[in-house]
Amino acid sequence: MLDAGSLLSWIGHHYYYLIALAVLIVLLWNSVVVVSGNEIALIERRWFGKKMPQGRVVALGNEVGIQARTLGPGLHFLIPFIYKATKSVFTEILDDEIGLIESVDGSAIPSGRIFAAVVTGHNSYQDGEAFIRNGGQKGPQIEVLPPGKYRINPYLFKLTKGKVTEIADNEIGIVESVDGAAIPEGRIFAHAVQGHSSYQNGEEFINNGGQKGPQIEIIPPGNYRINPYLFKVTKSQATKVGEGEIGLVESADGSAIPAGRIFAAVVPSHNSFQSGQDFISNGGQKGPQTEILPPGVYRIHPNLFRVTKAAAVVINKGEVGVVTAQDGAPIPMGRLLAQSVPGHSNYENGEAFLKNGGQKGPQIDVLLPGTYRINLNLFSIQVAPAVVVEANKIGLVTALDGLPLPEREYVAAPITGHNDYQDGSAFLSKNGQRGPQLDVLRPGTYYINPFMFAVEIDNVAVVERGQVGVIVSNVGDDPTEEMKKRLGASQHDPSEEEGKERYVVPKGFRGIQEEVAGPGRYYLNRRAFMAYIIDTTNITIDWDDQEDTRFDQLTVISKDGFPIQVSVKVVIRVRPDQAPYMVAKVGSIDNLIQHVIHPMIDSSFRNQASTASAMNFLQSRSEEQAKAELRARADLERYHVECVSVLICQIRLPEELMQTQTKRIIAEQQQEMFKMEQRSQAERTEMEKMRATADQQPTLVASEIAVKVATQKKTEMITLAEGSAEAKALEGTGEGKRLKAIGEGEAAKIAAIGEATAQAYEKQQEAIGEEAIKQIKIVELISQAIEQGAIKIVPDVLVTGGGSAVDGLMGQLSRLLPGVDLMALTRRHSEPHQGGQSGPPAKL
């Protein structure tokens, strides 16, 4: 071994080796570059190289400057002092990021371009030297870096991290390109190009002719590595059309709609407007679209297509939808509604409607209850109530469109096949006529187009029991002259009836129908048929002073000039088979009563009354009634009416005439009454006698018993009985005489009253004199006194003297009627009444 001295000696003699070794070690240390696994080495050449070209920023190969190339992880040897290495970490792009590259060096971007062209071989910008050598251009690069770790030279490439474009499930991406060719004039959106992979490949977009500006294509949901410097992406909600809704579409781009049209023509293959490019390529037109969107979710470009949501058309039960088209061919002149066209599926297929010749304006077809997806921009819908005809009602229909009615026709000719006017197209196609229709709607619900048919609700014709309906037809053929003559000749007295009954015709002809309608309900069109309801039971017509009678009582004048009021009932009946002829003659029962029977009865009774005195007319009532009935029956037969009876209910003579007649009859009746009363009193006397005898029977029996006891008692009782019997007999005789006198006096009074009344009161004095008048009044007083039992007929004492018999009678009455002023009483009865009352009799 060498000792320290030897070592130092050796070093002293060989120090240049040590210096060389030290220099070698320093050189080795500076020439070795160790790059770890997550690093890169950036190289700068300081000496001994070429000068970079003008405008270059990074050096290539042997050029002095910061080198475009980098050194990756590992051990590297560089010439010391010539190269300087600076370490930097890898560039890492996470999963939700993208790398946006801007080159600091390269060739210039051509004029008009914003982004550098893509070059190959640079290994995602990790080989800067290859980027420069292959013509890489300075500026923002189209390509983006996907997630990962990259050895990128920060002196050559400026890297900015961006977020991945994320489109959610309910979203769409709207793209606007910052670079590309110009959009052709007149277009709003750039046309679609192939190969750009949802705008993730900007190079393909540019190379394939992608245009600058708003893009027609959209980005569906997903994650996309899109260069935000090249493409500006805006998120928007997908179009959702819910249940019960429709989507109305209007395009902002496309060719022009032809003149005269309002809605765009339908083009195929645009996938419910989700492919804007196919829409444009296939000739889609700008403006409101005919097609609609049914319920669902659609990825529609909101800037290309404006979608307006509207409720689906719902027609409820009992309603009808009336449609008006906003586009189509014009309706022909003279027509009110558009013609029906096939294939439009209840107006849900607007394209078929327009292609098949659908016409603009109110449509003849209607929508029945249901839910419809109809383009409300193309068709406006009005909901109207369906026609409901209730029980015991009918619907009278008037057509608002169709052929004109022939002259003289009031009701249109009936046609079939229109399904109770619910198929307006069939109605028109079968030459239905405009105006009132013959066929009616029976009870039910009808879905009728109110633009085509107006319906009026009317009552059914009801013929009750005891009635018939005479039908007058406004439709049908006119009867021939031969038919009129035959029908007229079939009636009574055809020469008189012709011109009236000749309008009664068989069924199916215009006029009064020969066949009547019996009891029941009939769905009768009152525009075509008029029904006259005729009672076939007895009809009573009254002439009376009661409030509920039709006519006032008749007032006629008798032969002797007295007005007579007559209350009459006339009972008539129209036979069912004669009802049409009665209607032909007078029109109706009311006309018959007002214009035939009333004047006929009035005239008949006036004529009869003028041939008899008032009293005779009253007394011959039954004969007058029979004559009136006979005359009425003959007269009404001419009107095809049967007279059942004519009844005189009451005859009223003048009051003064009735009083005279009444008094005469009363006098006669009173005279007869007094005679009967006299006979009654005689019978009563006999009865009283027998009653007295009967009343004494117990006494006689007792007397017989008493005889057995004592003979003297018997004799006494017999004597008493005989005396009593004689007294009763005398009393009965007196009573008989009294009653006889009363009867004679009353008879004389009644006769005097009747005779005085018949001759008139103003002639009494001239006829019988003043004395006789006094005697009559006295007799009246006596009669009243006798009736009241105030006097006796046979006076106890009769005193006579000078003067007239009247004076004697007055004196006797003064004795019998004490306290009565007979003279004043006589004057009061002989003078006319003043004010209807008289004062009480004066006291004597």
Image (cartoon, helix red, strand yellow):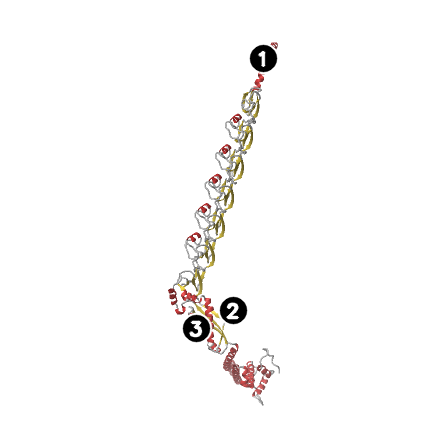
Q: Which residue is mark 1?
A: 17
SS for tag 3? helix
SS for tag 1? helix
Quarter of the picture holding the N terminus:
top right
Image quarter of residue 86: top right
**Mark 1 surroundings: few (<14), some (14-19) or many (≥20) residues within 10 A:** few
**Mark 2 surroundings: few (<14), some (14-19) or many (≥20) residues within 10 A:** few
Q: Earlier in the sequence, mark 2 or mark 3?
A: 2
Q: CA distance from mark 2 to mark 3?
A: 28 Å
Task: Classify 428 as above or below 799.
Answer: above
User: Which amino acid type is shown beneath numbered disc 2?
Assistant: Glu
Q: Which residue is mark 2?
A: 547
Residue 524 vs residue 168: left or right? left
Residue 680 vs residue 490: left or right? right
Task: Classify 835 as above or below 266.
Answer: below
Q: Position of residue 20 (x, y in %)?
A: 58, 14
Q: Which residue is mark 3?
A: 631
Camera-near label (1 vs 3) is 1
**Mark 3 surroundings: few (<14), some (14-19) or many (≥20) residues within 10 A:** some
Q: Residue furthest bottom?
A: 802
